[in-house]
Amino acid sequence: MDRIIKLTLGLFVILLVSFVAVTAYNGYIGQAYRSTLSSTYSYTCTISTDSPLTNVTLFLPVPADPTGNSPVIERMSAQQIPGIPDSWRTELYETGKGTFVKVTAPEIIPPAGTTTKDPYTIVLSAEIPSKRLIDTSDPMTKSPLFRPVQDLKPAACREGASGTAGGQCFTYMTTLYAKYDTNPNAAVTFRSDLKGKNSWTIFEPKTNEYQTSVYLLMFGEQAGWTPVAGYLESGIGSYDAPVMDH
């Protein structure tokens, strides 16, 4: 009988120690994740021209989620995005299908020496922290994109893409409005990029992210809405974090 009691007590002690160890380990994992977690959006908008533009009006797509929330809107409308020229006037414009920033400027004049191979480039960029975890696995339905997103199609990931197993790549179309006077041979390019990234450290640094970009090349004078090609890569990185819902 004593032997049975000793075996039972020994087994109980082993189970208790195992329970405490597992609880402590899980507690450490959760605490390490929460204390090191950071979520950030990286936004860049680039406009290049090889010729003078006058009487400029642009409606540039701004990344927003399906409900219209955007990490960029407030800073853009207040001209707090680094790189916005002093002569530009910016204001928000909501179409019901997408969010745009309306840019008006009397002129955009490239400096002397500008050529097609070396165009004049205006770069707007910002690193914007997010108070909430960014959904990088399903940005189409839950995270900011350049909307409206139309004709979304699965696509082969571009060469050098950093997606891991389970990652997906897509092409899509959106739109922008451009109106300006210029010479018939003028080449103007528009590109905008957004990356949403979560970072944390549990024993070692880990991240997950999504990336999307839109691009358009225009020639000569413009006066209307124009389709813009988009690319989306989601599910990049690690998804083995203990908690992903807060």
Image (cartoon, rainbow, N blue to C red):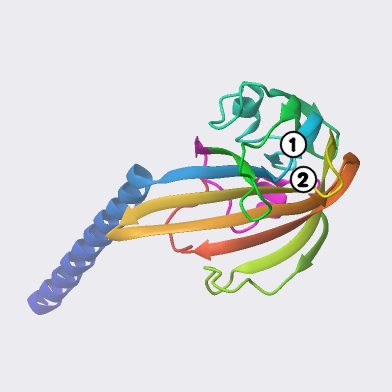
| Camera-side residue of 203 and 208 | 208
The percent position of residue 235, horizontal first and vertical second, equals 57, 63
| Residue at 33% from the left image edge and 58% from the top image edge | 205
**Marks 1,2: beta carbons within 8 A:** no
Camera-near label (1 vs 2) is 1
Apparent side of residue 190 relative to residue 9 in the rendered image (left or right): right
Mark 1 vs mark 2: which is more N-terminal?
1
The three-letter amino acid code for the residue at tag 2 is Arg
| On screen, residue 63 above or below 158 | above
Apparent side of residue 126 relative to residue 171 in the rendered image (left or right): left
| Residue at 64% from the left image edge and 72% from the top image edge | 157
| Residue at 33% from the left image edge and 54% from the top image edge | 201
Q: Which residues are magenta?
A: 126-149
Crowding at label 1, few (<14), some or many (≥20) Cα neighbours within 10 Å? Answer: some
On the image, numbered disc 2 is attached to which residue?
147
The three-letter amino acid code for the residue at tag 1 is Pro
On the image, numbered disc 1 is attached to which residue?
52
Q: Quadrant of the N terminus?
A: bottom left
The percent position of residue 117, horizontal first and vertical second, equals 64, 56
**Element at label 1:** loop
| Camera-side residue of 137 and 34 | 137
Residue 97 is a magenta residue: no
| Camera-side residue of 222 and 169 | 222
Toward the left, the furthest residue is 2
Residue 168 sits in quarter: bottom right
| Residue at 64% from the left image edge and 47% from the top image edge | 119
Residue 47 sits in quarter: top right
Crowding at label 2, few (<14), some or many (≥20) Cα neighbours within 10 Å? Answer: many
Marker count (numbered): 2
